[in-house]
Image (cartoon, coloured by chain):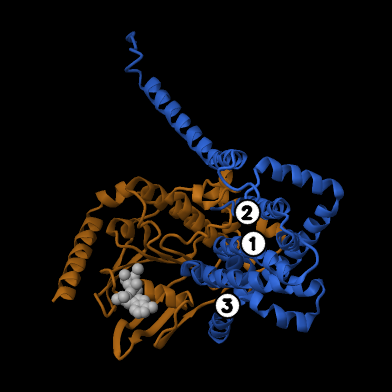
Chain colours: A blue, B orange
């Protein structure tokens, strides 16, 4: 074999390695960018508020909001507000998502049912569930049930629409395969329609989650005496703006958290993507 | 001996908003048990339609067909689809077991047959993997294993190797012949490759351009096991090749006029 002197500049591995390092640095930089925007806004806010460039009564500095949060936390009352809101969100979410998935799969698989129910869904969807809150309270009373139903109602629509779309858009060839290999309707449902529509369905659930948060705050502002929305509303009315901000930040935090959890679910449930 | 598959005067018309199109016209075929039959014809001549009718995915307009049943608990037919027939949300193993699971066979039989055919097509190491990580050739192996594992009375294959590169095609053709020679299933196989038809089949049916009819047949009596070299070296096969080539050429010309 011939000895070959490898010039470091012309060593192909070294060249690719250098290229790879540069890509890594660029990716790291992008991650830093993603984290830096909220930090930058918080710092700017803190600075402007502390230097009275913006009115600290309306925009209290973030550090004060954190202080208020800790104070409210020690009294324990804050956590009962958080707890009751989370309970309503979860119960309403499940009550909306489960029937939406089942009905959506049925509508997706059986076109006569789809044609029969589609106009109803289309007609009901644009009505904000919040606008129905008075009627919901008349039917379900002023207790927890009415809040849970309100959330369920607004989560239901994005999930059912995405589930139907998910089933309808399953490549025809998989339906042919299932038919050719003798799948019965139970197998069509659980082996083809459900997994095949799952990616699109999960996008709908992600949307439903965001809508659930929007709805709970508004519903608690309108007709409740507990919960994060109630906290925001009463703090605002009493001009306790730091307390109000605590409520807003909590909502933002839970929205972010739920999104992350659902993304995690998505990766677990769709290993085949 | 009664035919395994008997097709009588099968006609399929596609009708849409006042215009109709005859895809198949008076197709009559008898296929013997254990026979490997290839269909060759210009594209759009109704080959896929014919197989889909036999697969019960489409209904004939007129005419009829029967597939003889040897064993009571066997499915009549299983199809190997052109491509993309592997279900992406099932693992390789689950795909191969699909037909058996749909028929609710006992777990141990499903397991046994699945692993037998997985090994047969060399995918035993990939059993737990999802199809997204497989090459086109490996996906078609899954499709073939799924069809054979289902142990149907007859097998239907619609250009299963059309999307593969030349090398992969050769390997898969050989593997298919191997599995087939073990089971001696009756196979209907669509292809547009004359070489492939000569290598695989006992008989080649030539179809006309649309509306599709069977207009000629070639008996391929080259002894088995065969390989491509033998096919290429045999003067009769060379003759067949030229005939079929001319036939296709003419049919494509006809359809342009
Ligand atoms: N579902 C359908 N509706 C209308 N026309 C169809 C349908 N399926 C096939 N065809 C038409 O029938 C003819 C034969 O199609 P096909 O069987 O796929 O041909 P091949 O497989 O020989 O290329 C084509 O002209 C095709 O457009
Ligand atoms: Mg075709």
Marks 3 and 1: in contact by CB < 8 Å? no
Report the chain holding disc 1. A
- If you read the primary sequence from the N terminus, does the residue marked by circle 3 or circle 2 appear first? 3
Vertical placement of residue B100 versus B142, above or below: below
Is A10 in front, or is B246? A10
Q: Residue at x 35, y 57 (%)?
A: B162
**Quick one: label 1, few (<14), some, or many (20+) residues within 10 Å?**
many
**Residue B177: quadrant of the picture:** bottom left
Mark 1 vs mark 3, CA separation in Å = 16 Å
| Residue sticking out furthest to the left | B257
Report the chain holding disc 2. A
The secondary structure type at the circle numbered 1 is helix
Q: Residue A209 carries which label?
A: 1
Q: Name the residue under label 2.
A: A259
Vertical placement of residue A22 versus B59, above or below: above
Report the chain holding disc 3. A
**Residue A137: quadrant of the picture:** bottom right
**Quick one: label 3, few (<14), some, or many (20+) residues within 10 Å?**
some
Mark 3 vs mark 2, CA separation in Å = 23 Å
Q: Name the residue under label 3.
A: A125
Vertical placement of residue B132 versus A157, above or below: above
Residue B245 appearing in the image: yes
Classify mark 1 as within 8 Å of ligand 1 or not, answering yes or no.
no
Vertical placement of residue B147 versus B132, above or below: below
Ligand 2 in which quarter? bottom left
Marks 1 and 2: in contact by CB < 8 Å? yes
Marks 2 and 3: in contact by CB < 8 Å? no
Horizontal relation, residue B18 to residue B138: left or right: left
Q: Do pointers 2 and 1 mark residues of a single chain? A: yes
**Quick one: label 2, few (<14), some, or many (20+) residues within 10 Å?**
some
The secondary structure type at the circle numbered 3 is loop
């Amino acid at each position: 074999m011939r000895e070959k002197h490898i010039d470091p500049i012309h060593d192909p591995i070294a060249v690719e390695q250098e290229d790879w390092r540069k890509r890594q640095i660029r990716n790291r930089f992008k991650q830093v960018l993603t984290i830096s925007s909220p930090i930058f806004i918080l710092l700017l806010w803190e600075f402007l508020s502390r230097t009275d460039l913006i009115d600290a009564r309306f925009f209290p500095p973030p550090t004060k909001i954190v202080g208020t949060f800790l104070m409210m936390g020690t009294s324990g009352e804050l956590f009962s507000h958080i707890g009751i809101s989370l309970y309503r969100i979860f119960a309403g979410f499940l009550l909306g998502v489960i029937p939406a998935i089942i009905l959506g799969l049925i509508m997706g698989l059986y076109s006569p049912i789809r044609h029969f129910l589609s106009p109803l869904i289309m007609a009901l969807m644009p009505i904000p569930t919040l606008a129905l809150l008075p009627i919901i309270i008349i039917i379900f009373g002023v207790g927890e049930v009415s809040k849970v139903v309100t959330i369920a109602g607004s989560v239901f629509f994005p999930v059912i629409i995405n589930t139907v779309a998910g089933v309808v858009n399953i490549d025809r060839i998989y339906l042919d395969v299932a038919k050719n290999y003798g799948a019965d309707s139970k197998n069509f449902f659980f082996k083809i329609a459900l997994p095949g529509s799952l990616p699109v369905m999960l996008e709908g659930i992600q949307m439903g989650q965001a809508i659930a948060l929007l709805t709970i705050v508004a519903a608690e502002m309108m007709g409740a005496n507990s919960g994060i929305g109630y906290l925001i509303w009463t703090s605002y009315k009493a001009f306790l703006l730091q307390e109000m901000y605590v409520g807003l930040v909590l909502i933002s935090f839970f929205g972010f958290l739920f999104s992350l959890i659902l993304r995690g679910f998505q990766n677990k449930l769709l290993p085949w993507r | 001996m009664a035919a395994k598959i008997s097709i009588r005067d099968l006609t399929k018309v596609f009708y849409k908003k006042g215009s109709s199109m005859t895809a198949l016209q008076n197709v009559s075929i008898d296929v013997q048990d254990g026979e490997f039959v290839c269909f060759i014809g210009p594209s759009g001549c109704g080959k896929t339609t014919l197989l889909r009718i036999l697969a019960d995915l489409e209904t004939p307009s007129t005419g009829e067909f029967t597939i003889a049943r040897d064993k009571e608990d066997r499915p009549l037919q299983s199809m190997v689809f052109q491509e993309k027939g592997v279900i992406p949300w099932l693992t390789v193993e689950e795909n191969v077991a699909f037909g058996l699971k749909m028929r609710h066979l006992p777990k141990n039989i499903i397991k046994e047959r699945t692993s037998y055919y997985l090994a047969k097509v060399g995918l035993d190491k990939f059993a737990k993997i999802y199809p997204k990580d497989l090459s086109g050739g490996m996906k078609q192996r899954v499709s073939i294993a799924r069809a054979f594992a289902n142990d149907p009375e007859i097998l239907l294959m619609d250009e299963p190797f059309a999307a593969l590169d030349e090398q992969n095609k050769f390997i898969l053709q050989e593997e298919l012949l191997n599995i087939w020679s073990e089971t001696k299933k009756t196979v209907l196989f669509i292809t547009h490759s004359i070489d492939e038809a000569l290598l695989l089949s006992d008989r080649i049916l030539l179809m006309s351009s649309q509306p599709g009819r069977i207009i000629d047949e070639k008996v391929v009596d080259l002894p088995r096991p065969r390989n491509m070299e033998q096919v290429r070296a045999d003067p009769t096969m060379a003759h067949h090749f030229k005939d079929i080539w001319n036939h296709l050429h003419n049919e494509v010309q006809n359809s342009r006029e």
